[in-house]
């Protein structure tokens, strides 16, 4: 069975730690945007435990796996809504924001 491509609003899981932003293998986040140049990367928003703030960062395609809701019976409610985001990279466009982060 082939996994479908990752899309905006998909829940994804990290395959590897991302040390500079203190994210760890297995953490689940939500895709906010997709970047295609020069290679495919995803802007993903991750909740931070015990904090109203989250981390949004660009993640390379090979560092993510799609969360399969058929095998993982958790729901989108398991990814908390964030109050604010600490940007760790450029935004997709002026005024653009992840729909999972209230303004």
Image (tube, grey):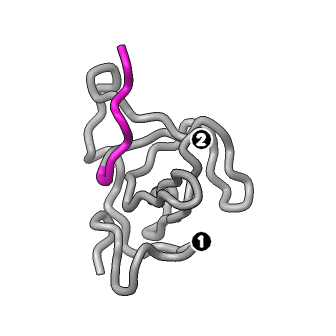
Residue at figure coordinates x 66%, y 61% from the top left? 21
**Disc number placed over residue 56 in the picture, else none:** none
Q: Are marks 1 and 2 in contact (CB under 8 Å)?
A: no
Tell me the SS state at disc 1: loop
Q: Is residue 8 above or below residue 12?
A: below
Q: Disc 1 or disc 2, which is closer to the eye?
A: 2
Q: Position of residue 42 (x, y in %)?
A: 48, 55
Residue at figure coordinates x 33%, y 70% from the top left? 101
Q: Residue furthest top?
A: 1
Q: Picture quarter containing residue 3?
A: top left
Return the residue at label 1. Answer: 88
Left/right placement of residue 14 relative to residue 70 reads right
Query: Disc 1 to disc 2, how far (Cα)?
Result: 17 Å
Q: Position of residue 81 (x, y in %)?
A: 32, 61
Where, quadrant-wise, is the N terminus in this rendering?
top left
Q: Position of residue 50 (x, y in %)?
A: 49, 60
Tell me the SS state at disc 2: helix
Q: Picture quarter containing residue 84?
A: bottom left
Mark 1: give few (<14), some (14-19) or many (20+) Cα within 10 Å.
few
Q: Residue furthest bottom?
A: 94
- 18 or 81, nearer to the observer: 18
Q: Is residue 14 above or below residue 71?
A: below
- 26 or 1, nearer to the observer: 1
Residue at figure coordinates x 26%, y 38% from the top left? 75
**Disc number placed over residue 63 in the picture, else none:** 2
Please report whichever mark, 1 or 2, sits nearer to the chain's N-terminal start: 2
Left/right placement of residue 6 relative to residue 85 reads left
Mark 2: give few (<14), some (14-19) or many (20+) Cα within 10 Å.
some
Provide the residue span drawn in magenta.
Answer: 1-9
Residue at figure coordinates x 68%, y 51% from the top left? 18
Q: Is residue 27 magenta?
A: no
């Amino acid at each position: 069975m082939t996994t479908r491509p990752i899309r905006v609003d998909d829940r994804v899981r990290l395959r590897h730690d991302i040390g500079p932003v203190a994210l760890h293998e297995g953490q689940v986040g939500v895709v906010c945007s997709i970047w295609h140049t020069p290679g495919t990367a995803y802007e993903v928003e991750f909740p931070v435990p015990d904090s109203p703030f989250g981390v949004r960062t660009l993640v390379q395609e090979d560092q993510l796996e799609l969360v399969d809701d058929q095998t993982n019976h958790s729901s989108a409610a398991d990814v908390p809504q964030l109050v604010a985001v600490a940007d760790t990279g450029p935004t997709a466009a002026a005024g653009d924001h992840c729909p999972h982060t209230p303004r």
